[in-house]
Image (cartoon, helix red, strand yellow):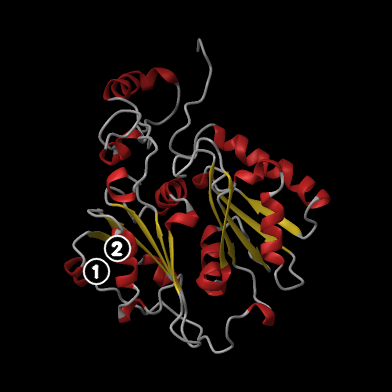
Amino acid sequence: AVYPCTAVGIPPQEDGWIGKATERIFLAPIKMTVIPEVEDMELPAEGIFHNLTITKINKHYPGQAPKVTNAMWGAGQMMFNKIMIIVDGEINIHDYLDVAKLISKNVDPERDILFSQGPMDVLDHSCSKMGFGGKMSIDATTKLSEEIRSDNIEDIDVTGVNIDEQAIKAQFPGVLEINDKLLKENISCLIISVEKNRKNHIRELNASLFGLEEFKSIKIIIFMEHTLDVFDVADVIWRFTNNIDPRRDSFVVPAKDDHSISHIGIDGTRKTKEFDDFDRDWPNILVSSDETIEAVDNKWDKLGLGEFVKSPSLKYKSQLYKGGAIVEE
């Protein structure tokens, strides 16, 4: 190489291992000097490290989760974090399925999801203003009596919930796909791809869906771009955490009564001037050109890299937007 570098793109990339090293190296100093109740920390590669953090604590008192979140957001470059998830107990935070189950079980969206704002990474394209945007704290810890909205909220089991996808698509033409597979794991979350066609589309769709009887047990809906495969959960996390300003793009639906759960919808689609009054440039997905893909394929056998692997770029070409490095409106 004449100029060694990393062109950061779809995770995991080379910089991913630097991020994981940072996660392990700084855990002890954070625990020893700032937040002694921290037991472990996970920076998922799909969250590009600054977008998503999972922190496990040893909980002793009410309000400890938001206290830890605020302390983390004040700890050096952790100030760039966008979404902070706080958990406790015996959970293995490096098992994302277990974390998702815990969030589904312990989180009451109107009570346990808090929003703030502050410094953001200058590379974050989703903020309305460069370097400054919204943050989200998700308290998935076991709740003490002082932290409970009501003693009468029924525990939910969504393993038997059936979403009539065809009926939903017929009633709401912008809906393309619905991933309800997480319900079978008793995770109260749907991932829905939408082709936006008007202002406030996602906000209005969110309110309409949570007004339906079959959605009364659903806590979370993540709305994604219509070009995305909503069944590829790793890609969903990557695009979702990249594309949201949590304070701007989250729509909380309060519980109807003390027996009901509350809900939240989060808009993980691309933001545009036309539909979102978004004025900043939006970056395209980074993929290799056809010429580069062909060149690498042709020389693969000579490179000593092992069994042939198709270019990852082939998967994402259908998700490219109009334009070059910067998306055209």
The extreme right residue here reads 32
Q: Secondary structure at mark 2?
A: strand
Q: Position of residue 158 (x, y in %)?
A: 41, 77
Instruction: Mark 1: give few (<14), some (14-19) or many (20+) Cα within 10 Å.
Output: some
Q: Amino acid at mark 2?
A: Ile
Front residue of 137/87: it is 137
Front residue of 275/29: it is 275
Q: Which residue is mark 1?
A: 165
Tell me the quadrant of the picture where the C terminus can be found: top left
Q: Position of residue 87 (x, y in %)?
A: 64, 64
Front residue of 138/303: it is 138
Give the quarter of the image for residue 163: bottom left
Q: Secondary structure at mark 1?
A: helix
Q: Is residue 317 left or right of residue 111?
A: left
Residue at figure coordinates x 31%, y 25% from the top left:
293
State the CA–CA distance, disc 2 to disc 1.
7 Å
Instruction: Mark 2: give few (<14), some (14-19) or many (20+) Cα within 10 Å.
Output: many
Q: Is residue 8 above or below residue 292?
A: below
Give the quarter of the image for residue 157: bottom left
The numbered disc on residue 87 is none
Q: Position of residue 232 (x, y in %)?
A: 37, 52
- Dots 2, 1 in contact, CB < 8 A: yes
Q: Is residue 174 above or below residue 239?
A: below
Give the quarter of the image for residue 37: bottom right
Q: Is residue 21 left or right of residue 44?
A: right
Mark 2 vs 1, N-terminal side? 1
Q: Which residue is mark 2?
A: 178
Q: Amino acid at mark 1?
A: Glu
Q: Position of residue 98 (x, y in %)?
A: 55, 64
Residue at figure coordinates x 72%, y 54% from the top left:
71
Front residue of 297/73: it is 73
